[in-house]
Amino acid sequence: MTEFKMALVGEAWGEHEERERRPFVGPAGWQLNSMLKDAGISRSECFLTNVFNLRPRPNNKIENICAPKKEVKHGLPPLSSGKYVRDEYLVELDRLYDELRQLKPNVTVALGGTAAWALLRDGRISKLRGAVSVSPIIPGLKVLPTFHPSYILQGGYDQRHVTVLDLQKARRESAFPEVKRPLRHIYTEPLLHELPWFEEKFIRRATRLGVDIETRDDTITCIGFAPATNVALVVPFEDLRCPGGSYWPSIEQEIEAWAWVRRVLALPIPKVFQNGLYDMHRLWRGMGIATAMPEDDTMLLHHALQPESPKGLDYLGSIYTDEAAWKLTVRMKHKGTIKKED
């Protein structure tokens, strides 16, 4: 098999693909070619295949090869709500996995929910797109999900630029086979005496300070401070696991924690926010805390570059970072997790 650094996996054949018995030769193929060109990728450099090398008759809808759970024997998750791939079509998954095992591409682009389901066992493409992860089925297979060209053609044209950006990311990822995550030290659930330690250790020497708050209803639940790209501190104020819902064991400690937040935000260090007008307004109106030297807002900077794109932090993370889809991950920590390093 010819060596390819990038593989593109679609869903199934359409009318044109069935006739020519190869993927992406119809309208979806034309759209894919256009997006590849915009992303700086040559189609000839990519291996193209589908999860199902067949046409789901009569109307090309993947539901035509699905059945209710009671009619299948396998234990795979549903392709969509209540829709399970029929047992007789599982041979197509084996064929796909054999192709990719032999090919060993540096990155495999899952085009659409069906491809994401086949390679990641999760078809929620709108939540997964743009985030690189390793396939749980094929060890070491690096997968980047994005939208299928057919979706772009059938009413999802507003996501075309997002797909192009994902393909640009895939082009960068095709230079190496491993998943590279940035190394970060995130200190969570600190004790009160650890706040001034973090301030002296990291914040006082920072040239810029990232700040972000989380809220629930009218309550500021926590505040994050990032004095560098590889280190951050989360200061919680709400913890529903604790009696009364407060993270701090006494009102005196909570007052001291807020006093520390007030002091840090008053430092003459440029501050960077995501949707900063909201955060600064909530801090001022809710707690009477002013922010000194607000410098940049990642939401507004992104909007200046791509006014047509979504502006949420999860989207920005999928475009500009190598992080996983962190909103799908939950981690529980314990108090006193700060490790004081020299």
Image (spheres, rainbow, N blue to C red):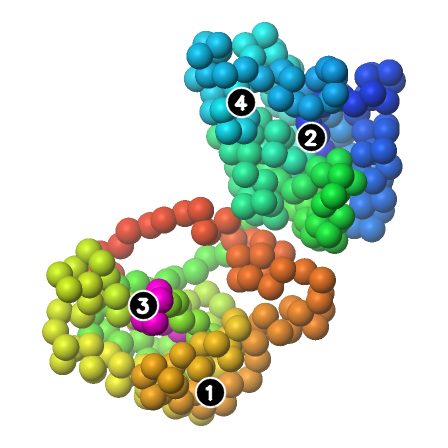
Q: Amino acid type of disc 1? A: Ile
Q: Position of residue 29 (x, y in %)?
A: 83, 33
Relative to 250, is 330 on the left or the right?
Answer: right
The residue to which callout 4 is attached is: 83
Q: Amino acid type of disc 2? A: Val
Q: CA distance from mark 2 to mark 3?
A: 41 Å
In front: label 4 or label 2: 4
Give yes or no for residue 92 being in the magenta stretch.
no
Quick one: SS at disc 1?
loop
The residue to which callout 3 is attached is: 221
Q: Amino acid type of disc 4? A: Lys
The residue to which callout 2 is attached is: 9
- What residue is shown at x 16% (from left), y 60% (from top)? 242
Q: Are marks 2 and 3 in contact (CB under 8 Å)?
A: no
Q: What range is drawn magenta here?
A: 216-226
Q: Which mark is residue 269?
A: 1
Q: Are marks 2 and 1 in contact (CB under 8 Å)?
A: no
Asked if 299 appears above or below 52 in the picture, the reply is below
- What residue is shown at x 52% (from left), y 19% (from top)? 84
Quick one: SS at disc 2?
strand
Q: CA distance from mark 1 to mark 3?
A: 24 Å
